[in-house]
Each structure stands twice: as structure tokens, then as C-alpha cells.
Image (cartoon, grey):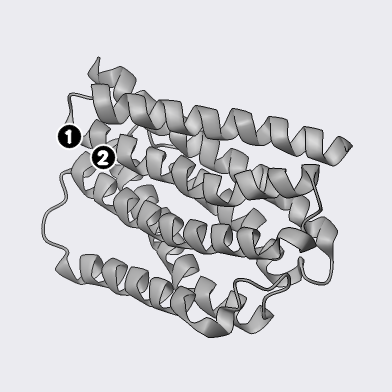
């Protein structure tokens, strides 16, 4: 019961913050960059709700294993939306820093996104099972992790050049999100307690949303 209360409260606060902040930026933002950040943030909250809402329901009712199919579908949806999240974040980097050209980098980000989504669509992932194959969990996260590394590097390089106050900590936030997420991918099947790392991973995304919110405040 304690886990159900704690997780549900955390999820309500997180999803409420992400969706309210995202929709506010998307609807009220006057700058195209702010609206893009709003779309990305709304996508984050909406995508995560597909996983977190069924998880909360499962904790309050018949348990996680009995609701494996709903949880798996939610995890699949979240995997897709998080891929799009990083692709949009790449375009925010371009717009924020006035980047033109770089067709090779853009093609790479699109290619990694397509590879990630294609891997997620493979039936071998067994999304509806309670415990999915570790091999495909690793495979589908390889292009995702490469996208994350690219985001870290390009934001760090431009922040060093422009001294961007709004996004100065974004490389650290993305690095922390992957640092907390990857152990869950690798070890949660054998060491369920590792799943607790999803909380600081989610807080890293809250930090990213807060940075995007600074763009909105700048534009008011």
C-alpha cells in the first residue's frame, strides 16, 4: 500500500507538471521555439501517462503481473514518444543556436529514430509479457542511447560557445537521465529493486522541462 500511495502521488505531480507546462507553452507561446518546447513537453507527459497510469492502477488493484499487457503497451508507447522527444529536442538545439546545414547530423538523428522505432515494433520484444527479453531491451535502446549522447555533445558544444543560461545544464540532465535509465534496462529483470532508479530518471526530465519553461518566461 505504501508503494501504491508514494508512486501514485509522485506520478500525479510529475504528469500534472509536464502536461500543464507543456500545454501552456504550446498554446500561449508566441515564439515558435517555445511552442516546439511545449509540444515536446506535452508529448513527454502524454507518452509517460500511457505507462504510469496503468502502473498506478495495477498497484492499487491486482498487481503488476496481472496487468502485464497494459503495462507493456504503455511501455511501448512511451518508447516511441521518448524517441520523438529527443528528435524534437535536436530541432530545439538547431533553432536556439541558429544552426543551418548539418544535413549529415540531421540524417543521423532521423536514422537513429527510425531504427529505434523499427526495433520497438519487432514482435520479439514481447511487449505483452510480464518479463520481456533482455536482448531486445538492449537492442532497441542502442540507437536511443546514441541519440542521447549526440544531444549531450551538441548542447555542451554550443553552450560553451554561446553561454546559454536556459540550457546550460541540459547536457548534465540528459546524462543523468540515461545514467539512471540504463541500469534499469540491464538489471531490473534480475534485481527488481533497481527499478527505483526510474524516480531520479524522471526527475531529470522534470529538470529538462523546467529549462524549457525558462524559454517561455523569456518570451513573455
The residue that mark 1 highlights is: 32
Looking at this rendering, what residue extends furthest in the top direction? 220
Location of residue 94 in the rendering, given as x and y in whole percent from the top left corner: 22, 49
Local crowd size for mark 1, using a 10 Å CA cut-off: few (<14), some (14–19), many (≥20): few
Residue that lies at the very extreme toward the left in this rendered image: 101
All told, the count of numbered labels is 2
Look at the numbered discs 2 and 1 and tell me whether their residues touch, using CB distance below 8 Å: yes
Q: Residue at x 80, y 39 (%)?
A: 4
* Up/down of 100 relative to 98, above or below: below
**Residue in view at x 27 percent, y 45 percent:** 92
Q: CA distance from mark 2 to mark 1?
A: 6 Å
Q: Which image quadrant is residue 68 in?
A: bottom right
Which quadrant: the C terminus?
Answer: top left
Instruction: Decide which of 67, 122 is in the foreground and name it.
Output: 67
User: Camera-side residue: 16 or 25?
Assistant: 16
Name the quadrant of the N terminus. top right
Res. 202 image quadrant = top right
What label does residue 156 carry, if any?
A: none
The residue wearing badge 2 is 36
- Residue 151 position within the rendered picture, expressed as x and y whole percent measured from the top left: 39, 56
Residue sitting at x 36%, y 57%: 84
Q: Is residue 200 left or right of residue 157?
A: right
- Lateral position of residue 72 relative to residue 104, left or right: right
Q: Secondary structure at mark 2?
A: helix
Q: Residue 110: x and y, percent? A: 27, 68
Q: Is residue 139 visible?
A: yes
Q: Is residue 215 above or below residue 83?
A: above
Position of 199 with respect to 40 (left or right) is right
Spot occupied by residue 157 in the image (x, y as percentages of width and height): 34, 51
Left or right placement of residue 149 versus residue 162 in this view: right
> Based on the displayed image, in which of its 4 quarters is residue 74 positioned?
bottom right
Secondary structure of the residue carrying tag 1 is helix
Amino acid at each position: 500500500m505504501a508503494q501504491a500511495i508514494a508512486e501514485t502521488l509522485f506520478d500525479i505531480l510529475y504528469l500534472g507538471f509536464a502536461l500543464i507546462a507543456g500545454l501552456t507553452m504550446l498554446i500561449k507561446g508566441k515564439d515558435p521555439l517555445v511552442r516546439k518546447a511545449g509540444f515536446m513537453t506535452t508529448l513527454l507527459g502524454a507518452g509517460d501517462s500511457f505507462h504510469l497510469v496503468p502502473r498506478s492502477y495495477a498497484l492499487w488493484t491486482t498487481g503488476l503481473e496481472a496487468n502485464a499487457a497494459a503495462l507493456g503497451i504503455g511501455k511501448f508507447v512511451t518508447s516511441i514518444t521518448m524517441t520523438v522527444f529527443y528528435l524534437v529536442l535536436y530541432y530545439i538545439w538547431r533553432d536556439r543556436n541558429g544552426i543551418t546545414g548539418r544535413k549529415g547530423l540531421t540524417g543521423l538523428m532521423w536514422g537513429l529514430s527510425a531504427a529505434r522505432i523499427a526495433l520497438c515494433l519487432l514482435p520479439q520484444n514481447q511487449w505483452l509479457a510480464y518479463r520481456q527479453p533482455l536482448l531486445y531491451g538492449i537492442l532497441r535502446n542502442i540507437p536511443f542511447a546514441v541519440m542521447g549522447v549526440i544531444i549531450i555533445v551538441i548542447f555542451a558544444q554550443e553552450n560553451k560557445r554561446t553561454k546559454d543560461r536556459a540550457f546550460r545544464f541540459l547536457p548534465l540532465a540528459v546524462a543523468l537521465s540515461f545514467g539512471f535509465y540504463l541500469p534499469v534496462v540491464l538489471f531490473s529483470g534480475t534485481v527488481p529493486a533497481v527499478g527505483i532508479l526510474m524516480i531520479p530518471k524522471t526527475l531529470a526530465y522534470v529538470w529538462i522541462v523546467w529549462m524549457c519553461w525558462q524559454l517561455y518566461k523569456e518570451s513573455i
